[in-house]
Image: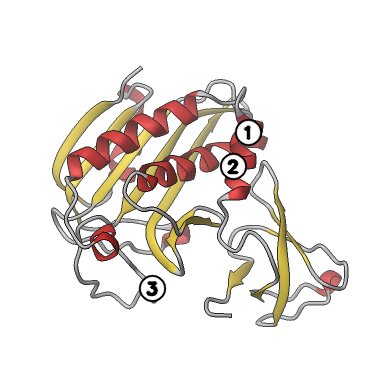
């Protein structure tokens, strides 16, 4: 199966557009825009993207055999599709910062927003929104650590090539679920940012059961990520606190 493409010159958000038109969209529909004026990230964060410079796209998936309790498998497939695409252009340094930002070394090259629509206890459809920095030379927002493919390799890359590679890889990986969930999860873990060794994290809210105060920094190693996306960290004292999205922060530079 090949993707079905819808090209828009300008749109507020490709995810919003696709959600509004999901009923008539087939599995593998890709909406991409030259200009996105109100791109959305996780938990309502905005996404900066210069016009005609980057990939701003959303793909609609109809994952008939993925249970809602295992929906993070789809996020893993999306993240790995981006990683595989970037591997075509970058020799090393590309990783997945949990839950699904894509980093080059300590800088963010891609943001991902995966949204699920449930019906009758099943996933009716999933919309995977991707903002991938390709040819942007300067970033003007207050985002702390953005980077583009051009800044890494020193030249422009045809957006049409990246879009095609990314869309086809995403459709392939998502379509391999649930049968391929175990090897995909193993690869996802292997490509995680800060996968090995102790690193510094910041706890967001008070967690009395884990003896962690809000804002407290602690050292830990990534132990696992569950099918629902929950991150387990292993601390030197033997404790293994579990965190949902936005409950823990990576402290960059430590």
- 95 over 58 or under it: above or below: below
Q: Which of the pair 160/112 is nearer the observer? A: 160
Q: Which of the pair 56/91 is nearer the observer? A: 91
Q: Which residue is mark 2?
A: 187
* Image location of residue 68, percent across then percent down: 62, 34
* Image location of residue 178, percent across then percent down: 61, 25
Pointer 1 local density, CA inside 10 Å: few below 14, some 14–19, many at least 20:
few
* Residue 206 sits in quarter: bottom right
Q: Secondary structure at mark 1?
A: helix
Residue drawn where x is 35% and y is 56% of the image: 40
Q: Is residue 20 visible?
A: no
Nearer the viewer's eye, disc 3 or disc 1? 1
Mark 2–mark 1 Cα distance, whole angstroms, equals: 6 Å
Q: Is residue 7 visible?
A: yes
- 3 or 1: tag closer to the N-terminus: 3
Q: Secondary structure at mark 2?
A: helix
Q: Which of the pair 87/241 is nearer the observer? A: 87
Q: Which residue is mark 1?
A: 183
Which quadrant: the N terminus? top left
Q: Which residue is mark 3?
A: 145
CB under 8 Å between callouts 2 and 1?
Answer: yes
CB under 8 Å between callouts 3 and 2?
Answer: no
- 132 over 21 or under it: above or below: below
Mark 3–mark 1 Cα distance, whole angstroms, equals: 31 Å
Q: Which of the pair 161/97 is nearer the observer? A: 161
Q: Secondary structure at mark 3?
A: loop
Mark 3–mark 2 Cα distance, whole angstroms, equals: 25 Å
Residue drawn where x is 40% and y is 57% of the image: 41
Residue drawn where x is 59% and y is 36% of the image: 184
Nearer the viewer's eye, disc 3 or disc 2? 2
């Amino acid at each position: 199966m090949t993707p079905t493409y819808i090209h828009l010159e300008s749109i507020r958000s490709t995810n919003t557009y696709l959600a509004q038109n999901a009923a008539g969209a087939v599995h593998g529909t890709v909406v991409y825009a030259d200009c996105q004026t109100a791109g959305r990230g996780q938990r309502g964060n905005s996404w900066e993207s210069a016009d005609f410079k980057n990939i701003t796209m959303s793909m609609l998936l109809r994952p008939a055999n993925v249970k809602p309790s295992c929906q993070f498998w789809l996020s893993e497939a999306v993240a790995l599709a981006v990683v595989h695409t970037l591997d075509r252009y970058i020799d090393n340094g590309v990783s997945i910062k949990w839950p699904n930002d894509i980093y080059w070394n300590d800088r963010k090259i891609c943001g991902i927003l995966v949204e699920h629509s449930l019906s009758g206890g099943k996933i009716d459809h999933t919309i995977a929104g991707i903002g991938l920095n390709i040819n942007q030379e300067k970033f003007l927002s207050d985002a702390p650590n953005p980077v583009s493919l051009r800044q890494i390799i020193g030249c422009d890359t045809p957006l049409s090539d990246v879009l095609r590679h990314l869309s086809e890889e995403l459709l392939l990986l998502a379509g391999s679920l649930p049968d391929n969930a175990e090897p995909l999860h193993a690869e996802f873990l292997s490509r995680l940012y800060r996968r090995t060794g102790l690193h510094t994290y910041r706890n967001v809210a008070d967690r009395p059961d884990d003896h962690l105060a809000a804002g407290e920094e602690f050292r830990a190693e990534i132990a696992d990520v569950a099918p629902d996306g929950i991150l387990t960290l292993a601390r030197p004292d033997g404790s293994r606190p579990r965190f949902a999205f936005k409950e823990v922060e990576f402290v960059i530079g430590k």
